[in-house]
Image: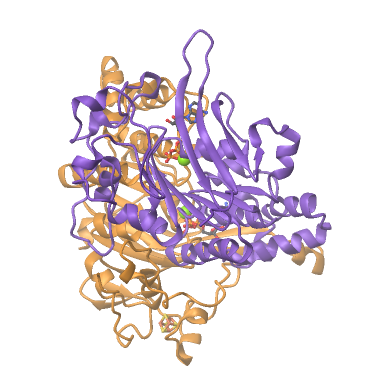
Chain colours: A purple, B orange
């Protein structure tokens, strides 16, 4: 079996804050993963672990003050970090599109939402003003926005949270991108609309071979939407693999902790057990495993060095030196 | 029951008037605005010491109702009572302190120019919550409650992740020790471990201090865990209210049934592929006649097109606004694996 070259590969990516005279604060630390055409790849993990910054680095939209410290991002064989910013801007829309976590900060408050959606198709697909607006309205309808023609004339502040989120999705899908970066795209949607939007994203993958990177905290959504996933903690990928395998048989204590703290509609009486303690201060990272201070299984060896992500089985990796003994060493 | 309401809304409506280019072209000089109905006659009470979940359709008016409760949006009609007395339109400092809100969009509700420490200190001093020399310690205590630490005090809102900002917004609302918390999607950006911490915090504030919470949420697994009662909204109306376990076991409105059927699940065998809501979502500019759910309702009969059902008791502490509430096909929540 030959695996086709991935659409996207993120190679040893580190992101952080550089201050002269200090060592840089590393926020995202040595993250690597690949995404194939048509694949739906989930990223879950700790709040503040660097999920949004990783997506922004792929999109070339890192906020001021955050820099790529090392590593590379390759899209269709091109090294994005050495691509000129003008060329990268051309990629955004028809090739790579992003749905941002906080729509209010990503939408222009003084431009009508229909025009904001139509802008991409006009610029990238060469559509006329009217044709681009028609496409914008069609995309809005596909995301389940009622009365889309009327809503196209609204300003962002006139829309509910979920309507704004769908505007972002319509905007991202309007040029039919090959890689869609979704940062919590359905948090403000009721579950019936969420269902519809997830189907829409799946269609983009199944019918047009687009790839999806899906950041979310909703494990049930990942379960129903994604093929593979990575679990992040304190800027590291601590576990990755097929969603079904990881959820059925987690091999990292942090993943186990996440599953134990997630509410499951089918088990209403199960107590939710949060992971005790706090995440590490990134400006002052502990030398060993970043999870060690909170880990009930931690051994002295865990404090020595940050464990590397090791392969357990094809497509399955974990970064925990105690994994075998904690999880009984049953082959994954 | 009536005496225990902390907040009660009676027949609250809210319309937004938006300029309409089409109308103005057709009839120049005529009324150039058309009306969007965000809330259409809401009756609801938040009882002392309960967590009431407000769920439902995106765009159905949940945030609008929440903002009316804290006074940041004015209702077009209807009445709001706080502990049995009408709430004045302009709230004094004490009334403002007592009813606090966590907004759905945390970033736009935090002043980007001042540090988190300054945001908290300002409130603690304004409302004289602790003596001046204890302000810093109290700020750290608040951050710890939401799973953050001292170093966050010196950073600006833009330097945090989405979930960190959401927790800062929660800490800010709790800082002034309110008796009512209106929380609009307060845990949607949190990882499940932090979410569990916050849910535990809400429960302990409710049990130990009698805090009453209106909890707006889309995640029904969270709602099931946290709340005592649930109110379901659809297109500007409350269509069903019941105790939590009762609502999920015995939903008496077809929209509620569709919602429950669409919940994403962790176990494969629970995934329901049939109960998906069909049809065009309705427009708040033009609310359907009769039952507003009828164009999409699988159970609708002719009468549903004509009669606008009001919220009516179907069982103890359980109300539904469906004409067929007592005749709906039995609803089988999908079996657990
Ligand atoms: N502009 C910035 N300046 C400095 N630090 C930042 C900035 N943006 C984010 N950070 C820090 O980087 C870390 C990672 O942030 P990121 O937004 O990627 O987290 P996340 O995994 O998306 O979290 P969440 O699930 O809460 O959205 C956080 O600890 C945050 O405090
Ligand atoms: N300032 C405004 N001007 C015009 N329309 C508005 C305004 N604020 C809200 N609306 C409209 O009122 C309706 C209700 O909005 P609201 O924000 O209350 O919904 P919601 O139930 O909170 O939805 P979501 O779950 O998506 O957050 C929507 O149709 C919205 O577009
Ligand atoms: S009143 Fe009729 S249309 Fe409305 S929910 Fe009940 S059955 Fe459906
Ligand atoms: Mg994020
Ligand atoms: Mg809302």
The image position of residue B26, as x and y in percent, is 80, 69
Single out the residue that lies furthest toward the bottom.
B302
Q: Quadrant of the C terminus of chain B?
A: bottom left
Rendered residue at 77%/59% (across/down): A132
The image position of residue A125, as x and y in percent, is 78, 55
Rendered residue at 54%/10% (across/down): A20
Single out the residue that lies furthest toward the top.
A21
Please tell me which residue lies in front, B263 or A237: A237
Is A78 located above or below residue A3 in the figure?
above
Q: Is residue B5 left or right of residue B61?
A: left
**Residue A19 in view:** yes
The image position of residue B231, as x and y in percent, is 34, 64
Please tell me which residue lies in front, A74 or B67: A74
Q: Is residue A325 left or right of residue B281?
A: left
Place residue B283 in its image quadrant: bottom right
**Residue B32 in view:** no
Q: Is residue B31 left or right of residue B50?
A: right
Single out the residue that lies furthest toward the front.
A1
Please tell me which residue lies in front, B221 or B210: B221
Place residue B143 in its image quadrant: top left
Q: Quadrant of the N terminus of chain B?
A: bottom left
The image position of residue B200, as x and y in percent, is 22, 45
Is B332 located above or below residue B153 in the figure?
below
Is A227 located above or below residue A82 in the figure?
below
Number of numbered discs visible in the structure rendering = 0
């Amino acid at each position: 079996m030959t695996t086709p070259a991935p659409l996207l590969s993120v190679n040893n990516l580190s992101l952080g804050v550089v201050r002269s005279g200090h060592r840089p604060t590393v926020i995202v630390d040595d993250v690597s993963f690949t995404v194939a055409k048509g694949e739906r790849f989930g990223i879950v993990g700790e709040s503040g672990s660097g999920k949004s910054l990783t997506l922004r680095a792929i999109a070339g939209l890192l906020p001021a003050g955050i820099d790529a410290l090392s590593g590379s991002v390759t899209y269709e064989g091109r090294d994005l970090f050495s691509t000129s910013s003008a060329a990268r801007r051309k990629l955004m829309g028809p090739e790579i599109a992003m749905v941002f976590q906080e729509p209010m900060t990503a939408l222009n408050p003084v431009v009508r939402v229909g025009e904001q959606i139509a802008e991409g198709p006009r610029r990238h697909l060469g559509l006329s003003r009217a044709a681009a607006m028609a496409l914008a309205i069609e995309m809005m309808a596909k995301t389940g926005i009622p009365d889309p023609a009327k809503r196209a004339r609204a300003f962002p502040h006139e829309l509910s949270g979920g309507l704004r989120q769908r505007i972002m999705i319509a905007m991202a899908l309007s040029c039919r991108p090959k890689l869609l970066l979704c940062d919590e795209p359905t948090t403000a949607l009721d579950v019936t609309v969420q269902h519809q939007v997830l189907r829409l994203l799946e269609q983009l993958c199944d019918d047009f071979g687009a790839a999806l990177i899906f950041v979310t905290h909703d494990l049930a959504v990942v379960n129903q939407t994604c093929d593979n996933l990575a679990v992040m903690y304190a800027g590291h990928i601590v576990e990755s693999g097929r969603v079904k395998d990881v959820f059925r048989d987690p091999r990292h204590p942090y993943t186990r902790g996440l599953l134990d703290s997630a509410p499951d509609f089918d088990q209403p009486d199960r107590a939710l057990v949060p992971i005790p303690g706090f995440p590490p201060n990134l400006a002052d990272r502990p030398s060993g495993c970043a999870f060690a201070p909170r880990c009930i299984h931690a051994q002295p060896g865990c404090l020595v060095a940050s464990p590397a992500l090791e392969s357990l089985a094809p497509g399955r990796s974990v970064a925990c030196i105690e994994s075998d003994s904690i999880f009984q060493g049953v082959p994954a | 029951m009536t005496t225990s309401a902390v907040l009660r809304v009676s027949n609250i409506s809210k319309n937004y008037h938006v300029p309409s280019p089409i109308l103005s072209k057709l009839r120049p000089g005529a009324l150039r605005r058309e009306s969007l109905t965000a809330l259409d006659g809401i009756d609801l009470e938040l009882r002392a010491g309960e967590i009431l979940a407000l769920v439902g359709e995106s765009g159905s008016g949940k945030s609008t109702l929440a903002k009316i409760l804290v006074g940041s949006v004015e209702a077009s009609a209807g009445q709001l009572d706080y502990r049995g007395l009408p709430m004045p339109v302009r709230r004094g400092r004490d009334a403002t302190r007592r009813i606090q809100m966590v907004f759905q969009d945390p970033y736009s509700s935090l002043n980007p120019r001042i540090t988190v420490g300054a945001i908290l200190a300002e409130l603690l001093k304004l409302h004289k919550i602790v003596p001046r020399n204890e302000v810093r310690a109290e700020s750290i205590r608040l951050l710890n409650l939401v799973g953050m630490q001292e170093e966050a005090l010196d950073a600006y809102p833009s330097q945090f992740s989405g979930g960190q900002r959401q927790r800062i917004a929660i800490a800010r609302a709790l800082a002034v020790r309110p008796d009512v918390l209106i929380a609009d999607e307060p845990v949607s950006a949190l990882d499940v471990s932090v979410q569990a911490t916050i849910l535990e915090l809400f429960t302990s504030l409710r049990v130990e201090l009698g805090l009453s919470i209106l909890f707006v949420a889309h995640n029904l697994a969270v709602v099931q865990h946290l709340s005592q009662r649930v109110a379901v909204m659809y297109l500007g109306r409350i269509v069903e209210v019941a105790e939590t376990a009762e609502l999920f076991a015995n939903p008496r409105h077809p929209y509620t049934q569709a919602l429950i059927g669409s919940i994403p699940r962790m176990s494969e065998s629970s995934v329901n592929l049939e109960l998906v809501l069909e049809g065009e979502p309705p427009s708040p500019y033009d609310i359907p006649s009769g039952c507003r759910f009828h164009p999409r309702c699988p159970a609708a009969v002719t009468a549903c097109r004509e009669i606008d059902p009001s919220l009516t008791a179907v069982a103890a502490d359980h109300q539904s606004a469906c004409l067929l509430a007592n005749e709906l096909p039995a609803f089988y929540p999908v079996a657990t694996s």
